[in-house]
Image: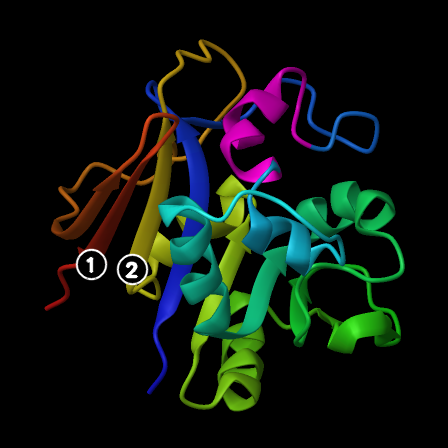
Amino acid sequence: MSKVVARLAMSLDGFIAGPDSGVEHPLGIGGERLHQWVYGLRAFREAQGLAGGTDNADSRMLEAWNAGSGAVVMGHGMYVTGEIPWGDNPPFHHPVYVVTHHPRETLHKQGGTDFHFVTEGPEHALSLAREDAGEKDVSLAGGAHLVQQFIRAGLLDELLLHIVPVLACTGTRLFDDLGTEHIEWHKTEVHDSPEVTHMLLRAVKP
């Protein structure tokens, strides 16, 4: 069975978006700082349909991680804030299942991205994504509230954090609202570069 993996850029103090995240500020005010390391990479630009970019270790890791994903699950808030910036050719290039309370028809975009709007909850969205992903991973794109739901339910297998050396001090925290019990993870990989540290964690499950 494919793994469920969340890949998120995070500040040293645990924020994954700036304050006032919404259509006007998709990453929150100042949230772009958490993603500066990725914008110039060849693998990122290629996913956006752009040429050029830096081909370094960060880019090659990003390329490998993208190639391992076969479907995406995301929350309604992330879809709403990303719909306009993503444009007609979103960077996913495979099925995306949006967990929402707002039913609508499947939205077909260029490059193989189809947005399916799932009103039956996160677990149902995951089951549909697994069918499409096959042997590949299901990527849990966010936002924070949906990732927290998956962690609480024991549905997240791996967490890949791109830790950026900045203190955001305000915004949306990844690890809020997780209850009071310890949640254990195995640290399986760490890759360091001048701009970011990539840490792959595997959930410890009963």
Percent across and percent down for residue 75 are 63, 53
**In this figure, which residue is indicated by the disc labeled 2?**
158
Q: Amino acid at mark 2?
A: Glu
Q: Which mark is residue 98?
A: none
Image vertical order of residue 81 relative to residue 169, above or below: below
Percent across and percent down for residue 24 are 83, 26
Image quarter of the N terminus: bottom left
* Gap between marks 1 and 2 measured at Cα: 4 Å
Give the extent of the magenta segment: 27-39
Local crowd at mark 2 within 10 Å, few (<14), some, or many (≥20)? many
SS state under label 2: strand
Residue in the image at 54% along x and 43% along y? 54
The answer to whether 192 appears left or right of 23 in the picture is: left
Whether the magenta-drawn stretch holds residue 116 is answered as no
Local crowd at mark 1 within 10 Å, few (<14), some, or many (≥20)? some
Give the mark, 1 or 2, whose residue is nearer the N terminus. Answer: 2
Q: Amino acid at mark 1?
A: Arg
Image vertical order of residue 168 relative to residue 199, above or below: above
SS state under label 1: strand
Between 155 and 15, the residue placed more toward the observer is 15
Q: Which mark is residue 202?
A: 1
- Check whether the beta carbons of the residues at disc 1 and disc 2 lie within 8 A of each other: yes
Q: How is the image coloured?
A: rainbow
Percent across and percent down for residue 205 are 15, 65
| Quadrant housing residue 13 | top left
Residue in the image at 57% along x and 67% along y? 72
Percent across and percent down for residue 161 are 35, 42
Image quarter of the C terminus: bottom left
